[in-house]
Amino acid sequence: MNAFTVQVRVMPRAALLDPQGEAVERALHALGFGDVARVRMGKHVVLEVTAATRDAALAQARAMCDRLDLVVDGGGVR
């Protein structure tokens, strides 16, 4: 078994309000960046997973996200 570092990008569900993203968007507009829209704030999680292969570590991380009901964006587990 080997230890693999797995990175996960977690985003809020599209249907939910994102108060952090809205606050950042307002701040950017106030700073003169008016072309910015639909800001979403997420989290970057780094895990060390022990598994036989890299693919097994990635599958294990995806299963963790599913069980925790985390919304992982398109290329979110690597």
Image: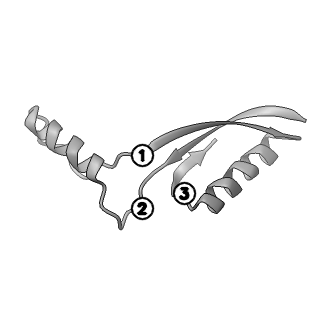
**How does the figure colour the protein chain or chains?**
one colour
Q: Which residue is mark 3?
A: 70
Q: Is residue 40 left or right of residue 70?
A: left
Judge the density around disc 3: few (<14), some (14-19), many (≥20) Cα neighbours within 10 Å: some
Q: Quadrant of residue 49?
A: top right
Contact between marks 1 and 2 (CB within 8 A): the answer is: no
The structure residue drawn at horizontal position 42% and vertical position 62%, both measured from the top left corner, is: 13
The amino acid type found where label 2 is placed reads: Arg
Q: Which residue is mark 2?
A: 13
Rounded to the nearest angstrom, the CA distance separating label 3 from label 2 is: 9 Å
* Mark positioned earlier in the residue sequence (1 or 3): 1
Q: Which residue is mark 1?
A: 42
Q: Quadrant of residue 62?
A: bottom right
> The C terminus lies in which quarter of the figure?
top right
Rounded to the nearest angstrom, the CA distance separating label 1 from label 3 is: 11 Å
The amino acid type found where label 3 is placed reads: Leu
Q: Is residue 21 left or right of residue 73?
A: left
